[in-house]
Image (tube, grey):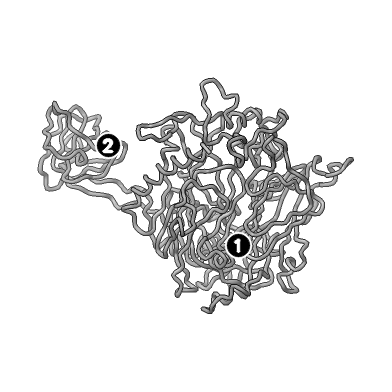
Amino acid sequence: MSRRFAGAVLSLAVFILISAVCSTAQSFRVQCPTSTITHPSTLNNNNAEPAYSGPTSLSLNGSGYMVPTAHVNGAIKCQQVSGGDGYSTMANGVQTFMFSFGPLSGLADIANGQPGTEFPSTFNTTYPGILLPGDPAVTDGAVANTWAAWPTPNPTGAFTYNGAVGLAPDIANLVSIYDIAESGNTVYVQANSPLGVNAGNTVKIAGTGGVPPAGYDGTWTVNAAPYTFPTAGVAGVTNYGFPATFNFTFTIPTATGLADVNESQTATASTGPVLDGHVDPRQIMDVGVMNGSIPAPLVAFDEDDEMFLTLTNVGMIMRPDLFEQHTIHFHGYPNASAVYDGVPDASVAINIGGSFTYYYLAPDAGTYFWHCHITPPEHLQMGMVGQLYVRPRQNRVPSGGNLYTYLGYQNGIGLPAGAVADLRTVCNPAADILCSATMPAINTGASQGLDKLGNPQKYTYNDGDGSTAYDVEYPLQIHGFDPNFHFVGMTFNPEAFADMKDKFFLLNGRSYPDTVTPGPMATQSSDGRMHYSQPMPAIINIPVGGKALLRIADLSVSEYGTLASLGIPMKEVGFMAKLLRDQAGNNQEYYTNSITLGGGESLDVILDASDAGCGFTGCAAAMYPAGSTFYLFTPQLDHLSNDQENFGGMMTEVHICNSVTGGNTYGNTCN
C-alpha cells in the first residue's frame, strides 16, 4: 500500500505542474518534459535507462513531497497518438472501415514493428522537411494503387523520423528594454514587461547601438531571472524599481565599461524559438487523418519510468456527422490518479480538435493493453485497441549481478550500506497480496549474463531466479470483429449491437497468410493515399536453442480466443500482468500446448525451443534445428476461416533461425 501512496503523491505533484502549463495551451499540444520532480535532470540523464544497482534514495522536500536525492532509476518516455479513422485489409481482400488510433510519434519505429515510445531526446525533435499525408508510407515508397502491390518495407530507408509529428518552435517573446547597463562583465536588464526567461535560457539583445564594445547586441545566456536588486544596489547601475520578473542578468566576458542605454526607442530583448509543446496542427492533420492502424500503436516502457502519452483527436473523415470523443484507458493498469484512467465518468474525454497528455508512473512489470473507453463495445469492435507492456527493472541488473540479491534490494532486503528501501518498489506479501516481485523460495544463484543473441539477458518479470528469461519477444494481440457491423457504421446506419458477432479473427490486425508477410502492410484509404494500416506482422523468429516471449492479449468484444503450439511447448509465466508465483515464493509456471483467453485478459508465455523445453526425457537439441517451421494457430476451426472459404484466421509461423538480427521484436530478420 505504501508504494501506491508514494506513487499517488508523485503523480499529484506532476499533475499540478502539468495543469499549470496547460492553462495557457492551445488545442493541439504535446508534452515531453526533460526533467520532472521524480526524474530531475540534475540527477538523471532521462535519455537512457540507467543500470539498477539499488533503490532510489528519497527524502521529503519543503512542500512535503518525496523527491529523489540520489541514484534515480528509470527515465522519461513519451509518445503521441491520434484518434480518428482508417481502413484495414484482410487476407481475402475485404477492406474494412475502422475507428482507430494512429501514430503521431515514433513513425519509423512503428512501421518497423517496434514500440513508438521514445526518450525526450528523440521525441522533442522536428522533422527536417514537410511531412506528407500518409507518411511514413508515402515517403517509404508505398504509393502503388493497390495494397497488394506493396513489395517490401522501407525500400529506400528514406523515412527514419521518430519525433513528435507537428512539433514546432514556439513564437519568440519580444519586449522593449527600459534600461540596460553593465557592471564588471555582468549586464543588468530592466524591461518594460516580463520576458518570461529563467536562468540558463537564451536571450537575444538588439537595437542597443552595436555589438560589444560599442553595444550589447548579441545572443547571451541568462544568469539570473527573475532578478531582485540587492538593498545596497549595484555599482554603476540604477535600480528603477521594476518587479523582479521584469529584470534579468547575463554576462559578456570580454567587455567592460559599456555605456548605460536608457529609454531607448530601439532596444529589445527576445527569447529564442524553443520547443515547448506547441505544434503545427496542419502537420498533425496531414498525418493523423485516415492514418489509423490496427492494432493501435505499440506502447512499451520500463519500470521506474515516467510516461507522457498524448492523445490528439483528429476526427473521422469517413463519418463527419459524428463528433466522437476518444480516451485512452490502460486496461488492468493501476493508475495513481483516476484523471488519467480514461474512463470518462472519472476522467476526461478528448473532443475533436483537442489534445490531452496522460501521465503514468510505471507500476509492476507485465503485459497490459490499452483501448478507448468511449462506448467501449463499439470503439473496441471498430479497432481502437492496442498492445502495452512494462519491462522489469531486472533487465538492468549489472552484468554478473546475482538476481536474487538485486531483487532483495528492490524489496528492501540486504541493502548496500547507506541505502534505504524505496517503498514504491517493496513487495511484502503480508501487506500487499497483489505484488508481483515476491522473493523466490530458492536462491538458484542465477546471475545477469548474455542471451542467445549476445545482448544483456532480458526477463519477463523480476523473478530473482532467471525463470522468466527469454531471447526475443513478440507482442501478440488477439482481436476479432464483425465486418457487417463495420459496414453499417460506415454507411450512416444505426448499429445493431445485439447482432454483433465476430467473424474475422486476427493476430496483430492480420489474418493468415498476412500474419507471415514481413514488414508493415499498407492499405489505400479513401484519401487516395497508402497508409500503414497494419504495421505489425506475427512472424515469430527464434534463435537456435532460444526462447521467445509472447506477450498475448485478447481484445475481442464477443469471442474467446484459443492459440495452440504444435512442437514447441508453451511455458506460461504470467497472467494479467502478474508473475505466476505464490506468496510463499513458489513458482506456479507450467508447460502447455494451448491457451484460451477471453476479452480483457492477457498472459505471458515463453515458446521454449531450448534443450530444457523439449518436454520429455531424452529430448535432444535436434528437435528444433535451424530452418524448422512450426505453427501457432487456433484449433477453433471457425476462427481459422474468417467465416469464409478463403484465406484468413488466427495462424502464424514460428521459425527456428541460426541467428536473429535487427531487433528482438517484429522487424527482425531470421538468418
Residue at 25% x, 29% y: name it.
253
Residue type at mark 2? Val
Q: Secondary structure at mark 2?
A: strand
Q: Quadrant of residue 393?
A: top right
- Residue nearest the viewer, comparing 156 with 324: 324
Percent position (x, y) of residue 511?
Answer: 69, 64
Relative to 283, is 439 above or below? above
> For the residues marked 2 and 1, what is the alpha-carbon distance in whole angstroms?
48 Å
Q: Label 2 belongs to which residue?
A: 222
> Callout 1: 10 Å neighbours few (<14), some, many (20+)?
many
Percent position (x, y) of residue 522?
Answer: 59, 65
Relative to 168, is 313 above or below? below
Q: Label 1 belongs to which residue?
A: 534
Residue at 58% x, 51% y: name it.
332
Percent position (x, y) of residue 365?
Answer: 60, 43
The residue most toward the front is 430
Residue type at mark 1? Gln
Q: Secondary structure at mark 1?
A: strand
Relative to 335, is 450 above or below? above
Mark 1 or mark 2, which is nearer the start of the sequence?
2
640 horizontally vs 520: left or right: right
Note whether residue 307 is visible.
no
Residue at 71% x, 32% y: name it.
441
- Residue nearest the viewer, comparing 275 with 548: 548
Percent position (x, y) of residue 144?
Answer: 58, 69
